[in-house]
Image (cartoon, grey):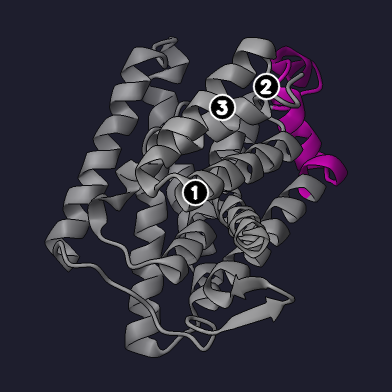
Amino acid sequence: MFGLLVNAIVAGLLLGGFYAAVSVGLALSFGMLDIANLAHPAFIILGSFIVYTLNIDFGVDPVVAGVLALPFFYVLGSAIYQIYYYSFERRGEEALRGLAFFFGILFITEVALILIFGVDYRFVTAPYIGPSLYIGNAELPLRMLVPFMVSIVMVGLLQLFLSKTFIGRAILAVSQDDLALKLMSIRPQRIKNIAFAISIATASLAGACLIIIQPVEPSIGRDYIGRVFAIVVLGGMGSFPGMLTAAMLIGVMESLTATFYGPSWSPAVAFGFLLLTLAIRPAGLMGR
């Protein structure tokens, strides 16, 4: 029983690390820029299929493929923000019509992937997909451990970027008071463009993490829409440490529930925990 509990907690922590990789981009776009990017999971699936193509056709390691795809996703994110800004944000219509815009991107991306790859599940190959490490009674599957490590590095680098660089501090500033940036002769639109492009770029590595953990098909991103928004809100809008903590908590809650009560109960318990936490602390775990 004790061994089962330990393995459930370890599996939950590894799962939480993956959830952090999936949620970090939304923590930047939704938590800091107030852009409710419903299409973020679709970009993650797009990243998975690009990683799949590079892995199967050219033998590129999935993590390396995710890194190689980063510039493409950054440019894609910058282009999408330009369309979003000139069509909605500049006119003050970003609330409802902006949601419809991203909802449309979600379905366009999904349909395009279905037309190109079909509806079959796709998977990648790598030396670390299959083996496990053992520390005492705890099993650490490498297919979960590698995405966990990638996620922690990605979140850590983004946190350093935000806190130590001029552009990073400008992103933090525009999330709080864009008028102050204008007084410093810095265009908030330019800073938001960079921040949103970075948020989409994270989908490249998150997609690599996803397809390492499990096979993917074009519509699987829908399973993560509610979960990633819940993690961002639970952690506290715009807080990377809070987002990481919330991802770990949700991962452990889901793992414990699946282990002792069955996987069908996992989402209900996780979202029940979210509602209870927000009822006690509406700003989230580490919200400002």
Q: In which quarter of the image is residue 286?
A: top right
For the question of whether residue 31 can be seen, the reply is: no
Q: Is residue 128 left or right of residue 133?
A: left
| Residue type (three-letter) at the residue carrying disc 3 | Phe
* Discs 2, 3 touching: Cβ within 8 Å: no
> Residue 171: x percent and y percent?
71, 33
**Considering only vertical position in the picture, is 230 above or below 159?**
above
**Considering only vertical position in the picture, is 90 above or below 73?**
above
> Residue 225: x percent and y percent?
39, 37
Q: Give the crowd class for mark 3: few <14, some 14-19, many >=20 residues within 10 Å.
A: some
Q: In which quarter of the image is residue 100?
A: top left
Q: Residue at x 46, y 71 (%)?
A: 212
> The residue tagged with tag 2: helix, strand or loop?
loop
> The residue tagged with tag 1: helix, strand or loop?
helix
**Considering only vertical position in the picture, is 213 above or below 99?**
below
| Residue type (three-letter) at the residue carrying disc 1 | Phe
* Distance (Cα) linking label 2 and label 1: 27 Å
Q: What range is drawn magenta here? A: 161-186
Residue named by callout 3:
273
Q: Which residue is drawn at 75% across and 21% down?
A: 181
